[in-house]
Amino acid sequence: MNVSPVIPFVVAVDGPAGSGKSSVSKEVARRLDFGFLDTGAAYRALAWHAEASGIDTDDAASVVSCLDSFDYRIGTDPTGYSVQVGAVDVTEAIRDPQISAVVSAVARVPEVRRHLIELFRSIMAAVDASGIIVEGRDITTVVAPDAPVRILLTASEAVRMGRRSAELTGSSVEAAGEQLRKRDAADSKVVDFMTAADGVTTVDSTELDFDQTVEAVIGVIREAAPFLAPEHVARGAQISEETP
């Protein structure tokens, strides 16, 4: 007798740099006892792998050539997870500024995106939880366009700049803003993550603190699946939904 696999409840979250999508998604996953998938880590890990292999990350063909040797693993526990390439733990190494400087070049290669999208889907299907929060840049439109909950988490550029500068030790708001704008500009050549697609709910956290943003996201999930999420009430959230 064929038994259909149990498909986890997927919450897809997109957003620009500095929107807080990683920290918010992790906390939402923790509160709901869901898994959490940081898709950006895979692109960073591949950039690390290319650099470690002596590959020119500006040469698309060379980047594609190292996909076969890219042995990638990532945990899905929102309270703490590691990122590995082969036997090497690269959890911290992939956050190095040198990797940040080249990751966009790696991520814009179409073959890379196709390869990693399939990897993300396999991780999502295999998660040992009733649901999973998946965050990135093209989750709502490409990776999981049929997810029952799709959210664009955003904030004004000024707020995103301030948040990013607070995360970077010794970085001014101006420097953080320039880094943020460069990354958004580079990534926007590949995917539109600034505008909500049809059916995607926008959560604008410009006027919200961290806990309020988490509650706003949980509120969106409750509307779609009240049987999954606990009774949380979003305060002061600016939420809108694009309908087909």
Image: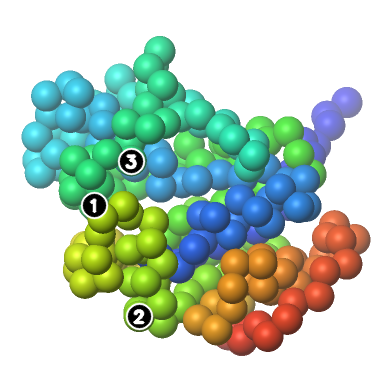
Q: Is mark 3 on a helix, strand or loop?
A: helix
Q: Nearer the viewer, residue 174 or 137?
A: 174
On the image, the x and y values in percent for residue 199 come to 60, 77
- Determine which quarter of the picture holds residue 217: bottom right
On the image, the x and y values in percent for residue 152 come to 53, 72
Left or right, residue 194 beside residue 24: left
Q: Is mark 1 on a helix, strand or loop?
A: helix
* Residue drawn at (26%, 32%) of the image: 48
**CA distance separating discs 3 and 2:** 23 Å
The residue singled out by tag 3 in the image is 95
Q: How crowded is mark 3: few (under 14 residues within 10 Å), some or many (20 or more)?
A: some
Q: Residue 39 got which mark?
A: none
Amino acid type of the residue tagged 2 in the rendering: Ala
Placement of 226 over or under 154, stated as above or below = above
Eye-nearest disc, 3 or 1: 3
Number of numbered markers: 3
Amino acid type of the residue tagged 1 in the rendering: Ser
N-terminal of the pair, mark 3 or mark 2, is 3
Specify the color scheme: rainbow
Dots 3, 1 in contact, CB < 8 A = no
* Residue drawn at (67%, 73%) of the image: 212
The residue singled out by tag 1 in the image is 104
The residue singled out by tag 2 in the image is 158
N-terminal of the pair, mark 3 or mark 1, is 3
Placement of 96 over or under 168, stated as above or below = above
